[in-house]
Image (cartoon, rainbow, N blue to C red):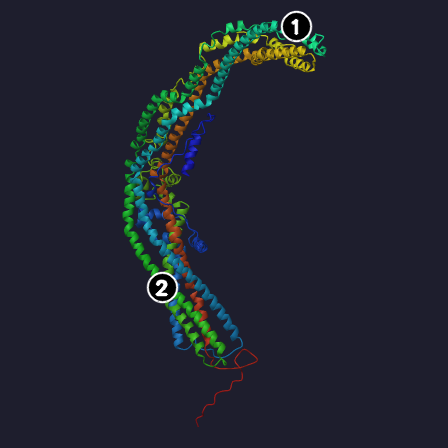
Amino acid sequence: MRAAGLLLAWVLLRPAGAQQCHPSSPAGVLRFTDTHAEIRVPALHRVPSSLDPLYGLVRHYLDLIQQNPLPTELLRAALNNPSSVRASQVVQYELGYVICAAVALLFTVTMPVAGLCFCYCRSRRRCGGRLRAHRRSLACRRRCLLVCLSITSIIILTSAICALVTNQRVKEQMEPGLGAVPATLRTLRQHIANIPQGVQMVVDQFEVPRQQIISDLGGVSRSVGLSIHTQLKAMTYAALADLQDRAGDLQTSLHHLQILNKTVRVLTAARAELEPALQERRQRVVALLDDPRCTSCASVLGRAQSLQLGADYSKVPSVEKVLKTLAGLPRSDFAEMIRQGNGTFNSIPELAVERMAQVIQELREEMARVSEKVQTIADGFPLPDYTRHVNKALLKAEDRSQPFLREVERFEWYRWVAGTALCSIVLLIVACNVAGMALGSYGLSKREDPSDYECRGEAGAKFLMIGVGLGFLFSWLLILMVFTTFLVGGNVQTLVCRNWVNQEIYKFIDTPGNLPPSMNLTQQLNLRKDSNLTAAYRECKSGAGLWEVLQLEKSYDLDEHLKSPKYTANFQKRLGDFTAQLGDVRLLRSEGRNDLETFARSGVDEVDYGSFQEEMKIPVVQTSLPALARSLEGLQKMQRNGTVAGRLAAEAKALWQMQNSTVQTQEALVVKLGESVRFLSRLAPHLQERVKTTLATIASVEAQLPVQAQQILRQEIGCFTRKELRYFAQYLHWVGQTLREDVASCQPLATALDNGRVILCDRIADPWNAFWFSLGCCTFFLIPNIIFAIRLTKHFRPIRNRLISTGSEETCPFHIPRVTALKL
């Protein structure tokens, strides 16, 4: 429950609409040492029992016996002026008990007298003898008597068992109950005496949140730096990657422009060199093919006549102007710039540790000053000067209760012995009844003639008479035990317990004039002048502190001492005033920016790369030299003229040499030129936009980094502040709860009063009253038991006259007189 209270305080302290803090570092619940558990007063409660119906029946019976309310006038007179109490007032209030006393007195006198009369009759053979005559209704009467005596014996047996159980329960509860009185008073004195040490122990527990806060301070700076780095790295890394791409575009474009310019010059020069050699070779081949001696040469003549140069790269646009503009670029080392920017950004956590070192040290010093402020809670606690009266009253009550409790314990032992002995006698009577009925019934079943003597039937009759004798002999002791315990237990229930439950006793104590000045509890306990015992009991039961019940609420306000801003204002202000520049990162220096701007306006995107591509579609030579050479080689095989065949072979070889030495070299240059043209043609349409976007992104990131870093810094510091303030709040809430409920709580006094009621009323008075009620039931049922036993005894003995009749149930009219001698 205490942990639940701490969590509730955390929820209440948390401001509405607060920013979401980093989930990896939530404020935990602090664990404090319970320093006052050993001197608590444990609360006692009524324990459910199988005898609860019996207890309820006895309480209803006592409510019928004593229907009068609390006799305030009689008690006031008895406490203030005992000599003024009149007997008529006591009799009027105790009228129900007086009537019961009269009944008990009548029982006490009547039963011994009846017993004496019975003994006299037995000596004259008039009671408990034999039946004079046999009647048909004797069997029915005997069965009725057996049933009635059996029921009576069962009732007595049940009551005796209940009396034994409750008698033992009273003994079991009396000893710990009596021992709980001085123990509770001693615990209350210890509770009050240990309040200063308890308050100091509670104050010393501030070490728990202090250590936690200092531990958090050790890692907050790096945590703030890592949070800034984590939240801004995506934006920063993206800008640096974009800058690296533009630097790569600049260097690659410059490389391809140089290749393009050089390749065009080489191709133009190679074309100029190839043109005369190609014309000469065409003329020779045409002249040879046109020779009449050349067989089947006309089919190749057309291709030979079309042998001429193809692509002319002197027609493509020049890129020298662009290269002139880009000459000397890049003037800055973009790789070093990116490395430095990346390193500066990645050093933000270390920079945060460095910038926050001073404020962290100041906060550690502030925690030492807060410890001194917390100590004022214990230094200003005023209870020790005001609890002397309560301590003296408890010590006085403890000293006075010791002799009384010893006497109560001694008399309780006598009561238990007497109760156990009387219950044993009642059980002995029941045993005599059972043995008598069993032996008598068995003897009757074995008797052939009612007038015959049967030893077992006679033994049963004697057992019944023993039970009757024990009933007469001990009935007055039973009724005396019943009435004595009834008078004590009944008044405890009706005068004390009933009025304790409905708090009429507290109202009587609170009423001015009811108690003598020496028993004025308001003054002895140093209660407020406007308070009373009832109000103090309710406040204590609800968990109020002693300083609230005593006259201290104006001189000491615990809630004022436990206000969090009193201890956290400077701590919170130092964190709130802290600022640091953690995001000043230069990603692109001015020379790098100038290089990119020069690259964008160099004209790379204005070159007509389409003309290059169109020209590259034209071959270096219009007619394929390898195809023409293979055709000549084929014609050479067909010739009959050796001279012509030799010349064809020579021309084919010359064409292969031209192809391999010159044309293939130019074709390789064209391929290389194509790669550069393709790259530049892809880059050119987006060059201006990309460079512009990159420069804008870099500028935006450089501008936003300090602002967003400051925002994240404020957010992280705010989250850290709220987290540490929750530690303060948990501690202060725990201090208030512990002082009110444990260390300086008034609740143990109310718990002690409730425990006293539970011990006296629920654990002692209830079984005590159930004991006399059960024993009284046994006692009063001895009367029908004696009657039924005496009447049943005659049926177990032989009948004097054996008369058999089929008519009336009266004595047989055919009486034959005994023959007697006559005097002459």
Would you place residue 129 above or below residue 298 in this image? below
- The spot of residue 232 in percent (x, y) is 46, 21
Q: Nearer the viewer, residue 26 or 554?
A: 26
Marks 1, 2: nearer the viewer: 1
Question: Sequence-wise, which precedes: disc 1 or disc 2?
Answer: 1
Which mark is on residue 421? 2
Would you place residue 411 above or below residue 425 in this image? above
Would you place residue 597 above or below residue 441 in this image? above
Would you place residue 675 above or below residue 464 in this image? above
Name the residue beneath numbered marker 1.
Answer: 283
- The spot of residue 128 in percent (x, y) is 43, 75
Q: Amino acid at mark 1?
A: Gln
- The spot of residue 774 in percent (x, y) is 42, 60
Q: Residues within 10 Å of mark 1 (few under 14, many from 20)?
A: some
Relative to 819, 743 lies left or right: left
Residue 257 visible in rendering: yes
Q: Nearer the viewer, residue 482 or 16?
A: 16
Q: Nearer the viewer, residue 232 or 805?
A: 232
Cα separation, mark 1 vs mark 2, equals 159 Å
Which mark is on residue 427? none
Relative to 646, 148 lies left or right: left
Q: Amino acid at mark 2?
A: Ala
- The spot of residue 136 in percent (x, y) is 54, 77
Q: Residue at x 39, y 28 (%)?
A: 724
Q: Are marks 1 and 2 in contact (CB under 8 Å)?
A: no
